[in-house]
Image (cartoon, rainbow, N blue to C red):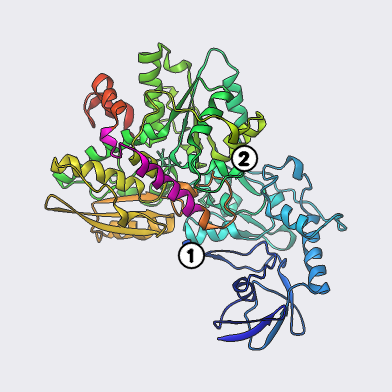
Amino acid sequence: LVNLTINGKSVSVPKGTTILEAAKNINVKIPNLCHLHMSDINMVNQCASCRVCMVSAGRGLVPACGTLVKENMNVQTNTKEALNARKNVVELLLSDHPQDCLACEKNGNCELQSIAADLGIRKIRFKGEQSTTPTDNSSKSIVKNHDKCILCRRCETMCNEIQTVGVLSGINRGFNTEVGTFFNANLSDTECTYCGQCISVCPTGALTEVNNIPLVWDALSQNEKTVVVQVAPAVRVAIGEEFGLEPGDISTGKMVAALRSIGFKHVFDTNFAADLTILEEASEFLHRLKENHNLPILTSCCPAWINFVENNYPQLLNLPSSCKSPQEMFGAIAKNYFGPNVMNVDPKDMYVVSVMPCVAKKYECSRSELGQGEVLDVDVAITTRELAKMIKESGIDLLNLEEECFDSPLGESTGSADIFGATGGVLEAALRTAYEWVTNKELTDVNFTQVRGLEGIKEASIDVDGTIVNVCAVSSLGNARKVMDDVAKGNSKYHIIEIMACPGGCVAGGGQPYHHGDYDVVKKRAKGLYNIDSSKKLRKSHENPSIITLYDTFLGKPYGDSAHKYLHTHYFD
Ligand code: HC0
Ligand code: SF4
């Protein structure tokens, strides 16, 4: 151990610890900006580029995040020199930063803004040159605005080390340095998966989602359109954070009331389609298992993962399930069943809005194969954050709304659907149904706890009436790459693999309220989903009465002809 003092307090920490970490151990907070350590997902961004964490140690000032502790070191975090250095550094960061905070997408959530506020900066003395790099609006999902980049490199670490996509890296030199793409291509011309994890860690407004709020208001104002909305599982345990609730608090009823008050004609649940996905996916799995063909089956509901597999494993596109994602299945059923058969509305006069924890869902709903001819299944996707903005914009007092229920019939769901939003949840839901279908016995304990939790690769062997089924749940694209490399080499023992691009699953999606690097937030959201599941009477997708009716009256058999027409898709290399 190394012994030192920080602000006069003694602390002993292992060799190799930084001053910043040692200070954290004794609850001394040192302001910092570029540094980001998320131990739950093994991400450390330690480039020491911003110099906000300057402290006095020994003979001078050092950056706390990049300086290792030494025996007998005397660290003072709040000397006049350290405070001045910090202020100077932030003023320099602001000198070439567009000072349009009031109109910034990140207003209220920006870490640069809050550090400037904490340091009491009232005047920016330096006027620096401004960047002229144009904003990249090329994709359906992500806006990259270099003007607001402070070169902290968090996005780069996320994209390269955690996701192993490798789209972002430092290019050019000096003032012209930027976090760019290969040949500075537009994001839409790269292999970006639109996972949005770079947005989740960006401290400023340099990376944000494409704002689709105006499209939704526009649709709501058109009388000739029947505008319906669906809400993804992970949204209900996170949206409350934007209104002061704790992560994981369940806001389903108030959120439904808010959506009605915003003006949606029907407020439905993506959960309904998650149950539907399980019936299709479990059927497809049992079919493949019987024929011992195209195994392992890979889940296909995460659109960033689908982009990743299409780009990186074109030789394995026979493995992802052909099931559309729940967002898309919902749209297909809303437009082709609910519209014409229940409401007497033509599919082209329906407008389906999705509220998703994800920015890749914006891209997914624009894929031309996900629809019937010209009529796409889903018209537009907004994120959890965007819905919160719409609620605030409308002056709705979310916390004081009376709770309301989803509309019927596309609003009913079982506990299996709720857990889709956490890594391992889709797999667990599929196992509940597949087990009962194969064995014809009741599954008395529906909790497959082996596949729960934040671990990036979780596996289990399940005894299904004498047949051992090896399953695996993966989150983050870096972990997906590890597992898929084995599959590609023929070394995988698994029969089913669930893959979600965001570390932790949709609860940590790129469109969720910012967690600012605190993964306890993500754990609480997941816990909220498991609480909803365990409080429901029906916890297996095949028991959902509205799904049973949907097959009886419209779809016929799971994995049958109509199901293929509306609920299945194909992939592109
Ligand atoms: Fe997910 Fe989904 S669970 S991907 O994580 O499958 O976004 O929440 O909506 O579609 O249901 C996201 C979350 C969904 C879909 C569902 C799946
Ligand atoms: Fe990389 Fe994902 Fe960001 Fe694309 S969205 S640049 S893949 S982190």
Q: Quadrant of residue 418?
A: top left
In the depicted structure, whether residue 502 falls above or below residue 53: above
Estimate the x, y position of residue 88 in percent, counting from the top left. Answer: 81, 64
**Residue 191: in sight, yes or no?**
no
User: Magenta residues, as a range?
Assistant: 522-543
For the C terminus, give its image quadrant.
top left
Q: Which disc, if any, is residue 42?
A: 1
Q: Which residue is drawn at the image coordinates 33% and 56% (left, top)? A: 484
Residue 450 image offset from top left, x and y in percent: 30, 57
Within 10 Å of the Cα at label 1, are there few (<14), some (14-19), or many (20+) other Cα atoms? few
> Within the image, what quadrant is residue 94 found in?
bottom right
Residue sitting at the far left: 466
290 or 366: which is nearer to us?
A: 290
292 lies above or below 255: below
Q: Which residue position holds label 2? A: 137
Mark 1 or mark 2: which comes first in sequence? 1
Residue drawn 47% across the image and 15% down it: 349
